Image (cartoon, rainbow, N blue to C red):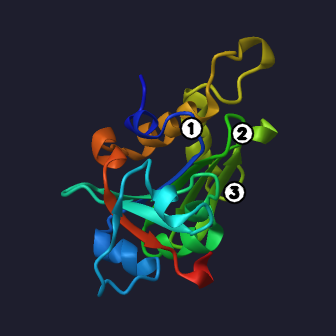
Amino acid sequence: MTSSLFEALGEEQFCVTAVRGLDEADVLERLGHSGKEPLPRYGAKDGVEHLGLDSGAVRIYCPEGAEWAYVFDVNGHSGFGHRTPVLERLSAGTEAVSVWSLIASTTHVAHIQDGQVLARFNAWTFEPASGPGADRLNRALERMGFFLPDDEVDDELSDPAAALEAVEDEFGLLVDPEAVAGPLPTVVIAEPLT
Protein backbone atom coordinates (compact mmCIF):
# COMPACT_ATOMS: atom_id res chain seq x y z
CA MET A 1 0.00 0.00 0.00
CA THR A 2 1.33 3.43 -0.89
CA SER A 3 0.38 6.17 1.51
CA SER A 4 -1.47 9.25 0.32
CA LEU A 5 1.32 11.36 1.82
CA PHE A 6 3.95 9.47 -0.17
CA GLU A 7 1.86 9.84 -3.31
CA ALA A 8 1.79 13.59 -2.67
CA LEU A 9 5.44 14.00 -1.64
CA GLY A 10 7.43 11.18 -3.27
CA GLU A 11 11.04 10.18 -2.60
CA GLU A 12 12.49 13.66 -2.91
CA GLN A 13 13.29 15.85 0.06
CA PHE A 14 10.20 16.91 2.00
CA CYS A 15 8.96 17.96 5.41
CA VAL A 16 5.38 17.47 6.53
CA THR A 17 3.91 18.08 9.96
CA ALA A 18 0.37 17.03 10.85
CA VAL A 19 -1.41 18.68 13.79
CA ARG A 20 -4.55 17.23 15.32
CA GLY A 21 -7.68 19.32 15.73
CA LEU A 22 -6.55 22.71 14.42
CA ASP A 23 -8.11 24.72 11.63
CA GLU A 24 -6.23 26.95 9.22
CA ALA A 25 -6.57 30.08 11.40
CA ASP A 26 -5.16 28.21 14.44
CA VAL A 27 -2.21 26.87 12.44
CA LEU A 28 -1.44 30.30 11.01
CA GLU A 29 -1.60 31.94 14.44
CA ARG A 30 0.78 29.37 15.90
CA LEU A 31 3.18 30.00 13.05
CA GLY A 32 3.17 33.72 13.84
CA HIS A 33 0.83 35.00 11.12
CA SER A 34 -1.80 37.52 12.19
CA GLY A 35 -4.34 36.41 9.60
CA LYS A 36 -5.12 40.00 8.72
CA GLU A 37 -3.45 39.96 5.32
CA PRO A 38 -4.40 37.59 2.51
CA LEU A 39 -1.92 34.80 1.93
CA PRO A 40 -0.33 33.92 -1.38
CA ARG A 41 -1.11 30.43 -2.67
CA TYR A 42 1.64 28.29 -4.13
CA GLY A 43 1.69 24.80 -5.57
CA ALA A 44 4.15 22.14 -4.52
CA LYS A 45 6.42 22.89 -7.49
CA ASP A 46 6.40 26.70 -7.63
CA GLY A 47 6.85 27.90 -4.03
CA VAL A 48 10.66 27.78 -4.06
CA GLU A 49 10.77 29.61 -7.38
CA HIS A 50 8.83 32.53 -5.91
CA LEU A 51 10.06 32.50 -2.30
CA GLY A 52 13.60 31.13 -2.47
CA LEU A 53 15.31 28.18 -0.81
CA ASP A 54 15.77 29.72 2.63
CA SER A 55 12.50 31.58 3.06
CA GLY A 56 11.17 29.44 5.91
CA ALA A 57 7.86 29.24 4.07
CA VAL A 58 5.29 26.51 4.57
CA ARG A 59 2.11 25.58 2.75
CA ILE A 60 -1.00 24.89 4.86
CA TYR A 61 -3.49 22.14 4.00
CA CYS A 62 -6.61 21.89 6.18
CA PRO A 63 -9.21 19.67 4.54
CA GLU A 64 -12.71 20.55 5.68
CA GLY A 65 -14.01 18.19 8.35
CA ALA A 66 -10.65 16.43 8.72
CA GLU A 67 -9.12 15.60 12.09
CA TRP A 68 -5.64 16.77 11.02
CA ALA A 69 -4.17 19.95 9.55
CA TYR A 70 -0.95 19.68 7.53
CA VAL A 71 2.08 21.95 7.20
CA PHE A 72 4.34 21.29 4.18
CA ASP A 73 7.71 23.00 3.87
CA VAL A 74 8.06 24.89 0.60
CA ASN A 75 11.69 23.74 0.52
CA GLY A 76 11.64 20.26 2.04
CA HIS A 77 15.41 20.25 2.43
CA SER A 78 15.28 22.92 5.15
CA GLY A 79 12.98 21.09 7.57
CA PHE A 80 11.57 24.28 9.10
CA GLY A 81 8.35 22.50 10.09
CA HIS A 82 10.33 19.79 11.90
CA ARG A 83 12.29 22.15 14.13
CA THR A 84 11.63 21.79 17.85
CA PRO A 85 10.32 25.35 18.48
CA VAL A 86 7.84 24.98 15.61
CA LEU A 87 6.72 21.53 16.77
CA GLU A 88 6.33 22.73 20.37
CA ARG A 89 4.20 25.68 19.27
CA LEU A 90 2.04 23.68 16.86
CA SER A 91 1.38 20.89 19.37
CA ALA A 92 0.37 23.08 22.33
CA GLY A 93 -2.84 21.58 23.72
CA THR A 94 -2.88 18.86 21.06
CA GLU A 95 -0.46 16.54 19.26
CA ALA A 96 1.65 16.65 16.13
CA VAL A 97 3.61 14.18 14.09
CA SER A 98 6.30 15.23 11.65
CA VAL A 99 8.32 13.48 8.93
CA TRP A 100 11.35 15.16 7.37
CA SER A 101 13.39 13.48 4.67
CA LEU A 102 16.53 14.96 3.15
CA ILE A 103 17.50 11.90 1.16
CA ALA A 104 16.35 8.31 1.45
CA SER A 105 18.43 7.31 4.48
CA THR A 106 18.15 10.58 6.38
CA THR A 107 14.50 10.41 7.29
CA HIS A 108 13.47 11.86 10.65
CA VAL A 109 10.17 11.34 12.48
CA ALA A 110 8.92 13.11 15.60
CA HIS A 111 5.79 12.72 17.73
CA ILE A 112 5.00 15.64 20.02
CA GLN A 113 2.14 16.18 22.45
CA ASP A 114 1.35 19.47 24.17
CA GLY A 115 4.82 20.85 23.51
CA GLN A 116 6.61 17.75 24.79
CA VAL A 117 8.61 15.55 22.44
CA LEU A 118 7.37 12.00 22.99
CA ALA A 119 9.54 10.33 20.37
CA ARG A 120 12.22 11.11 17.81
CA PHE A 121 13.49 8.74 15.15
CA ASN A 122 16.42 9.10 12.75
CA ALA A 123 16.59 6.36 10.11
CA TRP A 124 20.31 7.04 9.59
CA THR A 125 21.15 5.56 13.02
CA PHE A 126 19.32 2.24 12.46
CA GLU A 127 18.08 2.55 16.06
CA PRO A 128 14.50 2.68 17.33
CA ALA A 129 12.94 6.01 18.24
CA SER A 130 13.85 7.43 21.62
CA GLY A 131 11.82 9.46 24.08
CA PRO A 132 9.32 8.97 26.89
CA GLY A 133 6.53 7.92 24.51
CA ALA A 134 8.55 6.12 21.83
CA ASP A 135 6.70 2.79 22.02
CA ARG A 136 3.80 3.92 19.83
CA LEU A 137 6.05 5.28 17.07
CA ASN A 138 8.38 2.28 17.25
CA ARG A 139 5.48 -0.16 16.82
CA ALA A 140 4.27 1.79 13.78
CA LEU A 141 7.76 1.90 12.24
CA GLU A 142 8.36 -1.78 12.94
CA ARG A 143 5.13 -2.74 11.14
CA MET A 144 6.54 -1.00 8.04
CA GLY A 145 9.84 -2.90 8.10
CA PHE A 146 12.17 -0.89 10.32
CA PHE A 147 14.31 -2.61 13.02
CA LEU A 148 14.38 -6.04 11.41
CA PRO A 149 17.37 -8.36 11.88
CA ASP A 150 19.94 -7.94 9.10
CA ASP A 151 18.96 -11.21 7.42
CA GLU A 152 15.30 -10.09 7.21
CA VAL A 153 15.80 -6.53 5.96
CA ASP A 154 14.03 -5.75 2.70
CA ASP A 155 16.65 -4.19 0.41
CA GLU A 156 13.83 -2.40 -1.41
CA LEU A 157 12.60 -0.62 1.74
CA SER A 158 12.30 3.10 1.12
CA ASP A 159 12.77 4.92 4.41
CA PRO A 160 10.72 7.98 3.34
CA ALA A 161 7.85 5.85 2.00
CA ALA A 162 7.83 3.52 5.00
CA ALA A 163 7.99 6.40 7.52
CA LEU A 164 5.10 8.22 5.83
CA GLU A 165 3.04 5.03 5.67
CA ALA A 166 3.81 4.30 9.34
CA VAL A 167 2.56 7.66 10.61
CA GLU A 168 -0.36 7.68 8.20
CA ASP A 169 -1.48 4.26 9.41
CA GLU A 170 -0.81 4.85 13.12
CA PHE A 171 -2.28 8.34 13.40
CA GLY A 172 -5.05 8.15 10.79
CA LEU A 173 -3.53 10.72 8.44
CA LEU A 174 -5.00 11.13 4.97
CA VAL A 175 -4.47 13.74 2.29
CA ASP A 176 -5.73 14.31 -1.23
CA PRO A 177 -2.47 14.21 -3.25
CA GLU A 178 -3.92 16.41 -6.00
CA ALA A 179 -4.99 19.06 -3.50
CA VAL A 180 -1.57 18.96 -1.82
CA ALA A 181 0.15 19.43 -5.19
CA GLY A 182 -2.06 22.41 -6.04
CA PRO A 183 -1.97 25.96 -4.71
CA LEU A 184 -2.25 26.17 -0.93
CA PRO A 185 -2.10 29.12 1.47
CA THR A 186 1.59 29.83 2.06
CA VAL A 187 3.18 31.69 4.97
CA VAL A 188 6.71 32.38 6.17
CA ILE A 189 7.21 31.00 9.70
CA ALA A 190 7.79 33.83 12.17
CA GLU A 191 11.48 34.43 12.91
CA PRO A 192 11.56 33.42 16.61
CA LEU A 193 10.30 29.95 15.67
CA THR A 194 12.94 29.22 13.05
Tag 2 secondary structure: helix
Q: In this view, does 29 lie above or below 73?
A: below
Q: Position of residue 96 (x, y in %)?
A: 48, 60
CA gap, disc 2 and disc 1: 9 Å
**Above/below status of 124 relative to 80:** above
Pointers 2 and 3 in contact (CB under 8 A)? no
Disc on res. 163: 1
Q: List the residue tagged with mark 2.
A: 123
Please, what is the three-letter code of the amino acid marked with disc 3? Gly
Q: Can I make out residue 61 in this image?
A: no
Mark 1 residue type: Ala
In terms of depth relative to the viewer, which is nearer, 34 or 141? 34
Q: Which residue is drawn at 50% across and 34% down?
A: 10
Q: In the visual, does 77 lie left or right of 35?
A: right
- Give the SS element for disc 1: helix
Residue 52 percent across, percent down from the top left? 56, 63
Crowdedness near tag 3: few (<14), some (14–19) or many (≥20) residues, C-alpha within 10 Å:
some
N-terminal label among 2 and 3 = 2
The residue where tag 3 is placed is: 131
Provide residue 73's location: percent of width, then percent of height: 51, 58
Secondary structure of the residue carrying numbered label 3? loop
How far apart, in angstroms, are the residues tagged by discs 3 and 1? 17 Å
Between marks 3 and 1 in the image, the one whose residue lies nearer the viewer: 1
**N-terminal label among 3 and 1:** 3
Q: Which of marks 2 and 1 is nearer the N terminus?
A: 2
Q: Are marks 2 and 1 in contact (CB under 8 Å)?
A: yes
State whether residue 136 appears in this view.
Answer: yes
119 vs 106, nearest the viewer: 106
Classify the position of the N terminus by image quarter: top left
How far is mark 2 from mark 3, CA to CA? 15 Å
Q: Which residue is drawn at 56% across and 71% down?
A: 86
- The amino acid type of the residue labelled 2 equals Ala
